[in-house]
Image: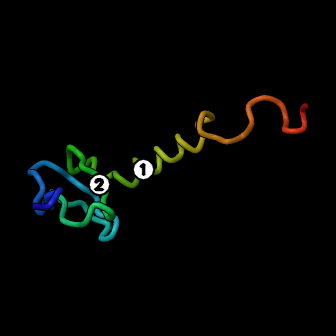
Amino acid sequence: MPLFKKRTAGKPGEWYYCLEHKKVEEGPECPGKDRFGPYATRVEAEHAMESARERNLQWENDPKWHDAPTGGTPDDD
């Protein structure tokens, strides 16, 4: 018996954005590696790429996630 069951059909109301086909789909039609989601609404899935861009910008500008030294320079001994 397989450890994980392959889910072939999505639940009604689960929306995904397929990165491969650049389209919104209800239920997972494409492999997980090729999609964002699930989203609660079709509209949210339609804006998946926009949401990802916004999150990436927030992360890139978050000072907690940069490797830069916080106090002084490396030559300060």
> Mark 2 Cα within 10 Å, few/some/many (few <14, many 20+)?
some
Which residue is outermost to the bottom? 21
2 vs 52: above or below: below
The residue beneath circle 2 is: 46
Where's the C terminus, which quadrant? top right
Quadrant of residue 28 in the image?
bottom left
Secondary structure beneath dot 1 equals helix
Secondary structure beneath dot 2 equals helix
50 vs 67: above or below: below
Where's the N terminus, which quadrant? bottom left
Task: Tell me the kind of residue under disc 2.
Answer: Glu
Which residue is outermost to the top? 71
Quadrant of residue 27 in the image?
bottom left
Which one is earlier in the sequence, the residue at label 2 or at label 1? 2
Q: Which mark, by number, is residue 52? A: 1
Q: Which mark, by number, is residue 3? A: none
Q: Picture coordinates of residue 49 (x, y %)?
A: 39, 55
* Residue at image coords 13%, 58%: 5
User: Is residue 49 shown left or right of residue 69?
Assistant: left
Q: Nearer the viewer, residue 74 or 16?
A: 74
* Residue at image coords 84%, 38%: 74
User: Is residue 66 shown left or right of residue 54?
Assistant: right
49 vs 69: above or below: below
Label 2 to label 1, Cα distance in Å?
12 Å
Q: Picture coordinates of residue 71 (x, y %)?
A: 78, 29
* Residue at image coords 31%, 55%: 36
Task: Tell me the kind of residue under disc 1.
Answer: Ala
User: Is residue 72 shown left or right of residue 51?
Assistant: right
Q: Nearer the viewer, mark 2 or mark 1?
A: 1
> Mark 1 Cα within 10 Å, few/some/many (few <14, many 20+)?
few
Q: Picture coordinates of residue 14 (x, y %)?
A: 16, 50
* Residue at image coords 40%, 47%: 51
